[in-house]
Image (cartoon, rainbow, N blue to C red):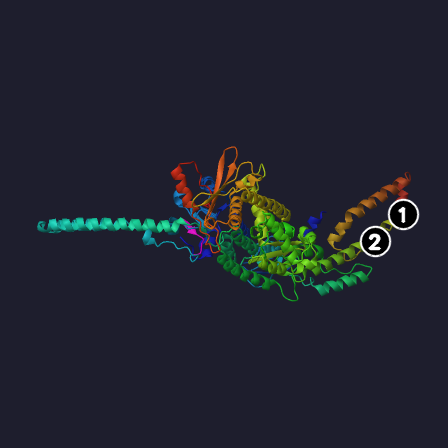
């Protein structure tokens, strides 16, 4: 899976906007949207929010978790715990990138938010790398990882699968004759 | 016809149609075009952009597109000539003209159906009233036929008297008509003899965006660049520039207050426009201070830097300010912070001593990201250099598109290459000015001064373009006025000629009015060139929109 595909999936998340035009309810295959009235907040998917923002037809309201104090707490919690802590949103990384690229004038303290989200991401990916490393080196049979987001899984997926395949090939070649018997150990 | 409500009568009319944009090749037009393009993108209006460099281009572009488009928007071209006669359009073509060239042709003003002018009516136009210029022919005929029918019903005895009465009245009417026509010619001559410029087109379109509440900081910045272009290329008076800057300042404060307050500061990547009372040294923040002083028209003319005395004075000036030569000669960004902090005030104080009273000018600067700070005049010079770059294998429309791109925030490397080209252009201008003055190439031909650049002059290729040649012309006149002792010569206008195309042997000619502090920037060379061309029957092409260059 490509990171751009993950971003595409992330664009289905809903975000609140304040439009400056009016439009009746719109019936789309994915669901209904609207009605839009100027000055009244309405929930729309991120793809529509970004398009409207670029055409200057709305103002984006940052999601509740995109706040400096909340993100600071999450970052500190993440650093303390060994396991993965619950995430603010299953697509927190993509949403941050999209909203801060296109709508940074609607988001207060955008620079600090960018830094905090990057910190949270770095901590989680570091934990993921450690976990993958121990999984491979200690040849464990299964692992349980809670609270991972699709983007993080996507980051490690190619590497983990390829390395496990390599390990399997190496081990199955070490004992050429009785491969079936050895498999049950791993 | 002047448009009263730009939103209803222009934008809402074209919003659902396909539009052809015909844009002239100057920076103000480029900025206006950018603003209009941004508005069209918001509302998904289909448009075709055609750059035009002269009347011939305009005619060809119109012929190519007249079948497909009904609505044409002309930016900085077309107002000062009878457009309907020149283009011969169909009856359903409608032209929206936003042009800074004045005077607006009277036919364009009084045509109600096909020509709509996006110009404010109070923009000191001085258009003659309708009755002074146009007159219905019907009144006379009606009078005559009425008299004749009266004659028929009267008894024959009085016929002779009535005949005489009718003849007298006819003679009277003819005399009145001749007088009226003479007055009309005089009024039109007065109206059309001087050419000057009105409010910037970019500012007009920014107001449209503001009325639609779709104005962004990008559009505001482009409007500021359009206004600064008029000032840098000396198209408007200082008073008008200051008034327009005040208008822009209101918009800038409105935008700054909207987004920023104590707790919620904006991201560093957002664009911030600020009002600056900054130095008149061209490109000084992207160059070294020394180079900038040597190559800016204002300082170089006051110091007379083409003479040895001038160089000494410059050294004195720098010593007076306490700026070490090593610091001043290196890139501005690498100068010591302690020097940069009070630089403007220090320079202002010292320049007052040397007779340069207006070294500081009101302008705007933008800054976004950590590295990027530009003044409006920097952007004008960079974009002008890109627009008129004389590299081989680059057509005019390529240059136009490159210059248009450099105005966007995302094309910074193009902007930087524009700044480099602008530096080369300024150095070339200064060297040419110095050589012309030192070798006395400026000749006085009676009522005007005259200078011809030979083909072998270095960098003469740069001056085959109208804007660059006009810039050179102005600098040369200023330098000449400062260097000559002949009082009469100081009040003469200057005409400059440079080779345009070496193979075809054509020459481009530019004329500018005399140098004075309070000039109203009215240029009479348009008519003068036409008359001269007729009387000498030389092959001329009056192609540029600015009639002062041929």
Secondary structure beneath dot 1 equals loop
Q: Quadrant of residue B129?
A: bottom left
* Magenta stretch bounds: B114-120
Q: Where residue B456 appears, x then y in whole percent?
A: 56, 36
As drawn, the label of residue A130 is: 2
Q: Which residue is mark 1?
A: A185
Q: Is residue B487 left or right of residue B321?
A: left
Residue B278 percent location from the top left of the image: 59, 58
* Extreme residue toward the bottom, this view: B262
Q: Decide which of B486, B401 is in the foreground and name it.
A: B486
Residue B470, horizontal then vertical, whole percent: 51, 46
Q: Nearer the viewer, residue A88 or B267?
A: B267
Residue B514: which disc? none
Q: Is residue A71 magenta?
A: no
Q: Residues within 10 Å of mark 1 (few under 14, many from 20)?
A: few
A25 in relation to B69, above or below: below
């Amino acid at each position: 899976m490509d990171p751009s595909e993950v971003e595409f999936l992330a664009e289905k998340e809903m975000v609140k906007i304040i439009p400056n035009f009016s439009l009746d309810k719109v019936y789309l295959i994915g669901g209904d949207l609207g009605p839009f009235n100027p000055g009244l907040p309405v929930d729309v998917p991120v793809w529509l929010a970004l398009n409207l923002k670029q055409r200057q037809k709305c103002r984006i309201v940052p999601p509740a978790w995109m706040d400096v104090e909340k993100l600071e707490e999450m970052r500190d919690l993440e650093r303390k715990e060994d396991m993965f802590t619950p995430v603010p949103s299953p697509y927190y990384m993509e949403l941050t990138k999209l909203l801060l690229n296109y709508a940074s004038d609607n988001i207060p303290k955008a620079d600090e938010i960018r830094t905090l989200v990057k910190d949270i991401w770095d901590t989680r990916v570091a934990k993921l790398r450690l976990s993958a490393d121990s999984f491979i080196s200690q040849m464990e049979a299964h692992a349980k990882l809670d609270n991972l987001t699709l983007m993080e899984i996507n980051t490690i997926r190619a590497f983990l699968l390829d390395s496990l395949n390599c390990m399997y090939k190496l081990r199955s070649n070490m004992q050429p004759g009785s491969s079936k018997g050895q498999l049950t150990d791993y | 016809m002047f448009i009263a409500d730009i939103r209803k009568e222009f934008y809402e009319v074209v919003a659902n149609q396909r539009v052809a944009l015909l844009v002239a090749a100057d920076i103000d037009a480029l900025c206006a075009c950018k603003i209009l393009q941004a508005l069209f993108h918001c509302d998904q209006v289909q448009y075709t952009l055609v750059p035009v460099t002269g009347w011939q281009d305009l005619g060809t572009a119109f012929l190519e597109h007249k079948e497909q488009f009904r609505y044409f928007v002309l930016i900085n071209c077309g107002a000062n000539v009878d457009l309907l006669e020149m283009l011969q359009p169909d009856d359903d073509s409608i032209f929206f003209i936003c042009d800074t060239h004045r005077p607006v042709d009277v036919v364009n003003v009084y045509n109600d159906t096909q020509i709509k002018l996006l110009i404010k009516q109070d923009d000191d136009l001085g258009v003659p009233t309708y009755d002074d210029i146009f007159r219905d022919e019907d009144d006379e005929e009606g009078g005559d036929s009425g008299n004749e029918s009266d004659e028929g019903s009267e008894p024959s005895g009085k016929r002779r008297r009535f005949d005489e009465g009718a003849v007298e009245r006819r003679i009277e009417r003819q005399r009145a008509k001749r007088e009226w026509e003479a007055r009309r010619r005089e009024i039109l001559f007065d109206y059309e003899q001087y050419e000057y410029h009105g409010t910037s087109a970019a500012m007009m379109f920014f107001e449209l965006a503001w009325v639609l509440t779709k104005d962004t900081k990008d559009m505001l910045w482009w409007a500021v660049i359009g206004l600064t272009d008029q000032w840098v290329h000396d198209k408007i008076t200082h008073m008008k520039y200051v008034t327009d800057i005040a208008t822009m300042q209101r918009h800038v404060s409105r935008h700054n207050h909207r987004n920023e307050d104590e707790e919620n500061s904006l991201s560093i990547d957002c664009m911030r426009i600020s009002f600056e009372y900054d130095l008149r040294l061209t490109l000084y923040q992207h160059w070294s201070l020394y180079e900038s002083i040597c190559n800016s028209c204002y300082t170089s003319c006051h110091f007379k830097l083409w003479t040895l005395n001038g160089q000494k004075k410059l050294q004195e000036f720098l010593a007076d300010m306490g700026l070490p030569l090593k610091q001043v000669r290196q890139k501005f960004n690498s100068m010591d912070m302690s020097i940069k902090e009070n630089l403007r005030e220090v320079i202002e104080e010292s320049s007052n001593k040397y007779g340069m009273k207006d070294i500081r000018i009101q302008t705007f600067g933008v800054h976004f990201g950590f590295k990027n700070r530009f003044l409006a005049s920097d952007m004008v010079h960079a974009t002008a250099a890109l627009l008129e770059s004389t590299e081989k294998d680059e057509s005019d429309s390529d240059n136009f598109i490159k210059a248009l791109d450099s105005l966007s925030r995302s094309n910074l490397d193009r902007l930087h290459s524009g700044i480099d080209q602008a530096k080369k252009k300024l150095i070339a201008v200064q060297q040419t000015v110095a050589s012309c003055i030192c070798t006395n190439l400026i000749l006085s031909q009676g009522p005007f001064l005259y200078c011809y650049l030979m083909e072998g002059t270095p960098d003469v290729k740069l001056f085959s373009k109208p804007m660059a040649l006009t810039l050179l012309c102005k600098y040369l006149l200023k330098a000449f006025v400062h260097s000559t002792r002949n009082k009469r010569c100081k009040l003469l206008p200057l005409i400059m000629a440079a080779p345009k195309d070496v193979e075809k042997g054509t020459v481009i000619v530019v004329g500018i009015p005399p140098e004075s502090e309070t000039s109203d920037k009215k240029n009479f060379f348009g008519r003068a060139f036409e008359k001269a061309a007729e009387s000498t029957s030389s092959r001329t092409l009056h192609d540029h929109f600015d009639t002062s260059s041929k």
